[in-house]
Image (tube, grey):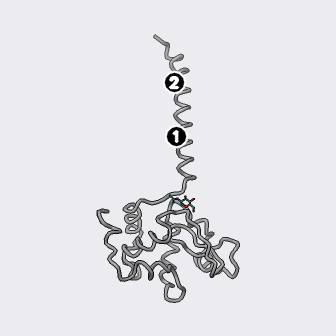
Amino acid sequence: MLSPVSQQLIQLPVTMKALLTLGLLLFSVSVQAKVYERCEFARALKRSGMDGYYGFSLGNWMCVVHYESNYNTTAINYSPVTKSRNYGIFQINSRYWCNDERTTQAENICKIPCSDLLRDDITEAIKCVKKVVRNIQAIPAWASLKAHCENRDLSHYTQNCGL
Ligand SMILES: *[C@@H]1O[C@H](CO)[C@@H](O)[C@H](O)[C@H]1NC(C)=O
């Protein structure tokens, strides 16, 4: 039978190993690109008050995001027409909405660095996207909305999500 002191000496490295493993796990999770699962994203949208925001249904958002980023928070795509980039899960454009320090005549209406739009946490992206929607008549947004989502049956995007 080991004395309590020598038991502690044996257990310490085990604890450290566990902490190290946990640390590495958290680190890899935090640097990983978050790709939302369909229903997870639908619920996040709903919680953020996006269902029906300025007349945009949940299905509309799900459809747009499906085509724009496939729910990938770190998606970045260059748009040759506007010589700017689209950032994040909503593919928000650096010509108008955010600052990436390499787009000429950028307006940065959301007053955020574009990198904020690539976070796992979509709080900032949602705030900005609400601004986009409020301006959607004035500034064109999301070609995929017209091309793939408007006047379609969008019910499958939120099917079996418990919403
Ligand atoms: C998400 O987007 C990033 C950046 O474009 C890419 O490297 C990654 O492979 C994408 N993830 C998935 C699952 O498509």
Residue 30 in the image, given as x and y percentages of width and height:
55, 52
Q: Earlier in the sequence, mark 2 or mark 1?
A: 2
Q: Quadrant of the C terminus?
A: bottom left
The residue lying at 39 percent from left, 79 percent from top is 56
Residue 155 lies, in percent from the top left, at 31, 72
Q: Where residue 57 appears, x then y in whole percent? A: 36, 77
Q: Nearer the viewer, mark 2 or mark 1?
A: 1
Residue at position x 69%, y 82% from top? 105
- The quadrant holding residue 37 is bottom left
Distance between the Cα atoms at labels 2 and 1? 17 Å
Disc 2 is placed on an element classified as helix
**Residue matched to label 1:** 22
Figure quadrant, ligand 1: bottom right
Q: Which residue is mark 2?
A: 11
Measuring from the top left, give residue 115's x and y in whole percent: 61, 65
Residue 163, placed above or below residue 136: above
Drawn side of residue 6 relative to residue 161, left or right: right
